[in-house]
Amino acid sequence: MKNRKRVFIRPGDIKKIAALTSETNVTSYGVMVCAGMISVSVLLCYIYRLNLLCSALVFATGAFCIPLVLFYHFYQKRENIRFSQVDVYIHQMAYSFMRNPKILTALKDTMEIADGHLKQVILKSVVYLESEDKALVYEESLKIIEEQYPCERVRTLHKFLISIEVRGGEYRQSLAILLDDFDRWVRRMYKHQEDIRHVKINSNIGVILSCILASMSIIMTSMINVSGELSLNITDNLIYQIETCGFLVISICYFTYIQIHYSRDWLSGVRDEASVIRDYNYVFLRKTSVITTNKLLCTAVILATGSFLGNDVNYLFLPVSFVIVSAVYICPVLMKSKAMGRLKEDVYNGFSEWLREVAINLSHEPLQVAIQESYGSCPAVMKPSLGRFIYELDENPCDVAPYYRFLSEFNILDISSTIKTLYTITENQSDHIDDVINSIISRKNELADKHESLKNRDDISVLQFAEYIPLLFVSVKIGIDMMLVISSYL
C-alpha cells in the first residue's frame, strides 16, 4: 500500500498526532503501554529464568520499542480519522453542489456536518473565499483544504467544481460518475483497513502464542525435576541464556515491526515526480550499450583473474565468480522489471485523473485542445508520451495512429483500448460528447476498481504470510532447547 509514505519520528510528533485524535490523553496511554511492556518483560524473564544481563538486554529492547509503538499507534489513528473526514467531505461537497452548483454554498453545507480538524480547515477556506476577490480565488481557497488533505480525489472534485462554477454547463451526470468512483474507492479502502486490522491481530496473537509455546521446555524440565526421576536444568547453560534472550529480543522487535509495517497513509497514493522520472529514465532512456559493456567488462575481469592465477585458483573462486557474473547479468533485468511495474502502477493511478481532466476541458473545448490543455496537470509518468501524442496530433489531427501509439510503451491493454475510444469523439459529435466521455470514464472506473482490488488482495496475501514468522522463531528455540535437554540427560 505499497502506496505508503515513509514516516520518521521527530521530537513532539507523538503529542501532535495524538492531539488530532479523539483518544485518551497521550500521557495516560503511554503510561499504560509502558506498564504493560514492563510487566510482560518481567514475567517473561522470570518464566524463562534469564540472568541479570540477559534480562537487562530484554528491558532495553522494550524501552527502545515503546516510543515506536506509541508513535505508530497514534499515527494510524490519525490517518484513519483523516480518511473518514475525506469520505465525509467529498460526498457532502458533491451532494450539496448537485443540489445548488455554488462552491461557497457547498463548503458551508459541508462545514455544518464536519468536525475536528476538517471543520477548522473548511472554515479557513470559506473565510478566504468570502474575503478575497482574485481571478484564482476558488483555486486558492480550495488549495487550503488540499494541502491538509493531499488526496487525488479531493483535487479531482475541486477541479470539476471550479470548472462548473466558472464555465457552467451540464454537470449532473458527470458528477454522478465521480460519486460512483468515490463510493468504490471508499468501500475498497474501508475493506482494506478491516483486512489489515485482522492480519495485525493475527500476527500479534502469533507472537503471544510463540512465547507460550517457547516456555514448554522449561515447563517440561520442571515437571521432570518435581517427579524426582531425573534432575535436569538447562537454564544455567550459557547457550540457553543466549538463545532465549535472542528469542525474546526478536519477538519484541517483530511485535514493533508489525505496528510500523502495517501503518498506512490512506490519502497520499501518488509517488513524487523525482522517483517517477528516475524509473522512467532507467526503463526507457538508459542506453543498453552501457549495460552490455558493463556485463562484458565484468566477465572479462573474472576470466582474466582466473587465467592469471592459473593452478593457484582456489576452489571458492569458481562459485564466487559464478555468483558475481550472474548478479551482473540478472540484477539489471530485475531492477528494470520492478521499475516497469512501478511505472505501470503510476499510469493506472494517473490515467483516470488525466481522463477526467480531458472530460472537464471537453465541456468548452474541442478534443484536440482539451488534450493539449491537460498537459500542465498531467502525471509525470504520462508527460513524455502525452507530449509526443500532442505533437503528432498537431502534424495530422485526423490520423488515428497517434491514438494507438499513446502510452503503448507500457503495454496496458485496458488503457490502450480506452484511448482508442477517444478517437470517436470529434467536433461533429458535440451533442453526444458528454455521453461518450462519461461512458469512457465509467468503464475506466470499473477497470480501476478491479485493479485496486487485486492490488489490495496481493498486499494482504503478503501480510498474511508474515503471520507464520513467529512459528519460525519458536521452532528454532524449541529445537535448541530439546538439544540441550538431550545433552543434559546423556
Image: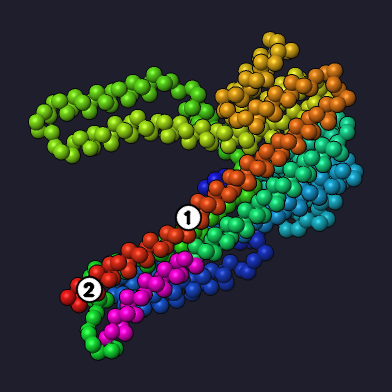
Residue 401 percent coordinates (x, y):
66, 15
Q: Which residues are magenta?
A: 205-225
Furthest toward the top, the residue is: 395
Is 306 within the magenta? no
Distance between the alpha carbons at the discs numbered 1 and 2: 33 Å
Q: Which residue is rendered at x = 24% and y = 34% of the image?
A: 321
Image quarter hosting the C terminus: bottom left
| Overall secondary structure of the magenta section | helix
Q: What colour scheme does the image use?
A: rainbow
* 281 versus 197 height, above or below: above
Q: Is residue 279 visible?
A: yes
* 129 versus 22 height, above or below: above
Residue 330 percent coordinates (x, y):
37, 32
Q: Which residue is rendered at x = 36% and y = 75% of the image?
A: 215
Which numbered dot is residue 465?
Answer: 1
Q: Secondary structure at mark 2?
A: helix
List the residue tagged with mark 2.
486
**Count of labels shown?**
2
Q: Secondary structure at mark 1?
A: helix
At label 1, which amino acid type do we have? Answer: Phe
At label 2, which amino acid type do we have? Answer: Ile
Q: Is residue 144 visible?
A: no
Q: Earlier in the sequence, mark 1 or mark 2?
A: 1
Which numbered dot is residue 357?
Answer: none
